[in-house]
Amino acid sequence: MKDKLADVTFWLAMEIAKSDPPVNLNEIYQGSLELDYLYQILTNKAQSHWRIAHKEELTPVLINNAFFRAIALLYDRGLEYERSRGAKETIWVKDLLHLPI
């Protein structure tokens, strides 16, 4: 089950990341109507994908855990990205690209 949880989490994270318009993870992480909508759409899509592609039924608990792990993964990744943009280690990159510091 652990491997399947990781696979479903990754699949959901990729679906969230490629959504157009982009998902506002700050709002979603706080809880919102958008989160409820995204949850319904993507968990159904994941269940359908796994049923067709892998001939497996995902349990509601697995899908629920994978969805919220995917949100947390993307949110944490966004936070780390924002932190690293202001870090001393990235100043040389900004200089190289002629970006404002």
Image (spheres, rainbow, N blue to C red):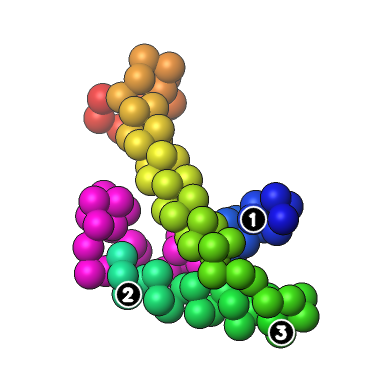
Q: Return the residue nearer the eye: 48 or 91.
A: 48
Asked if residue 98 shows in the view, the reply is: no
Which residue: 44% across, 55% down?
68
Distance Cα–Cα, label 1 vs label 2: 21 Å
- In the displayed structure, 21 sits above or below 90; it is below
Label 3: how many residues lie within 10 Å, few (<14), some (14-19) or many (20+)?
few
Q: Which mark is residue 5?
A: 1
Tell me the element at label 1: helix
19 in magenta: yes
Q: Which residues are magenta?
A: 15-34
Marking on residue 52: 3
Give the spatial CA distance, label 1 vs label 3. Answer: 17 Å
- Residue type, label 3: Ile
In depth, the one of 79 and 90 nearer the eye is 79
Residue 36: percent from left, percent from top: 31, 70
Q: Is residue 81 above or below residue 5?
A: above
Q: Position of residue 71 (x, y in %)?
A: 42, 53
